Image (cartoon, rainbow, N blue to C red):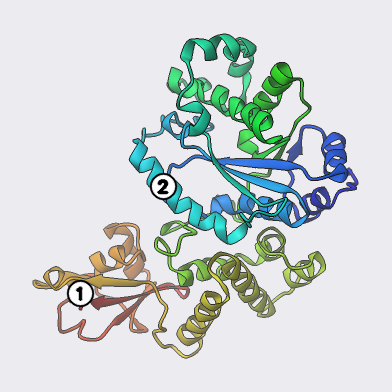
Amino acid sequence: MTYHPKSDFMRVMIERGYLADCTDYQGLDDALSGGMVTAYIGYDATAQSLHVGHLLNVMMLRWLQKTGHKPITLMGGGTTKVGDPSFRSDERPLLGPEHIAANIDGMKQVFAKYLDYGESGNGALMLDNAEWLDDLNYLAFLRDIGRHFSVNRMLSFESVKSRLDREQSLSFLEFNYMILQAYDFLELNRRYGCVLQMGGSDQWGNIVNGIDLTRRVLDHEIYGMTTPLLTTSDGRKMGKSAGGAIWLNADLLSPYAFWQFWRNTTDADVGRFLKLYTEMPIEECDRLGALGGSEINAAKVILANEVTTLCHGAEAAAAAEATAREVFERGGAGDDLPTLELAPEDVADGISIVQVLVRAGLAKSGKDAKRLIAENGARIDDAALTDPGLVLDAGALAAPVKLSAGKKRHALVKLAQ
């Protein structure tokens, strides 16, 4: 990146590694330097919580507000009814209004931790595109908006092209998604003076569409900015683990498990993740990321504490670190480990250790659990677990049992009271 920004926000985006592409560096930088800019990111309500894959963009909105600008979190109450086809191999399952509303409620809990939705001049706005999409008149929309879109151009966007090249069906419903997202940008510009849309690099085509539409209809100058597609240094998609998505809501993933995810960061990713997911000074991020040997583990604890404090609060971060020390340094069970509670009827006839490993989230399947045991990767109360045929009954669970998969993943198993 050779551009030298004048605005604080653009400088943060470039220095910390958030910026993949921008439609007009100079124009956006001038707008950011000239006064308060309103920007948005859209979130379709396809799950009941945001996950770590969303956190990069949430942090962008946080930095936007910290540098004096106004963030909009746009909930896709309308667009979720269609489903974004970008880089998917099949159509998303269609959700009903009640399911969408429940998902939005869950996602709102996360945003409130990172953004200030107060009455101040740059207080964040929480909006829902169902407000203008639900009651659209189809014929009027086709005539006023549809005429600005070239099907030839839409077919050239990578998100659509990749689907067609693989000869995978793309429904007319999904094809309309990019028109609706473009219309969101137009409406946000018209209603709230929003001049910047941000999103992941897979949203580039949708963002460019919105800019083009707004210029054609309103003749307003607006901008787009994308983040890089983030993968870990070993090539895995950020936010995925063996146990599934790393949720940001505590009722779906315990603060301890969240903390542990960051503590398990690969050495090569520590410096980069400190820049992206914490607010620590760049120089300190670089210093910690350059540590070697056992010292890098201390940097990973700092990373885990900083990210967990932002998401779940300082108390949860301190409790998670204390539990980790109890588990790893003294071999104890810890108070804050993910816990599987088994009902008495579950163990009335005994329950296999293989099934328990799966239900505790330490193995993806029975086959995976047996492989873990065969490769000496499983432990029960810190002793090697060697018998895949082991059956636990109520007596064996009279006290909580600690299960481990490898050195870093643990869970407690106990009987429900």
- Report x, y in % for residue 310: 60, 66
Circles 1 and 2: CB distance less than 8 Å?
A: no
Q: Label 2, on which residue?
A: 103
Residue at 65% from the left image edge and 24% from the top image edge: 209
- Report x, y in % for residue 337: 40, 76
Residue 277 in sight from this viewpoint: yes
Disc marking residue 390: 1
- Is residue 128 or residue 164 the one in the foreground? 128
Sequence-first disc among 1 and 2: 2
Residue at 52% from the left image edge and 34% from the top image edge: 129
View extreme (bottom): residue: 330
Disc marking residue 82: none
Kindly indicate the quadrant of the structure image that contains residue 94: top left
Q: Secondary structure at mark 2?
A: helix
- Give the residue type that dot 1 points to: Leu
Q: Quarter holding the N terminus? A: top right
Task: Give the side of residue 42 with respect to residue 269, left or right.
Answer: left
- Is residue 240 or residue 369 the one in the foreground? 240
Q: Secondary structure at mark 1?
A: loop
The answer for how far apart the CA atoms under marks 1 and 2 are is 40 Å
* Number of numbered discs: 2
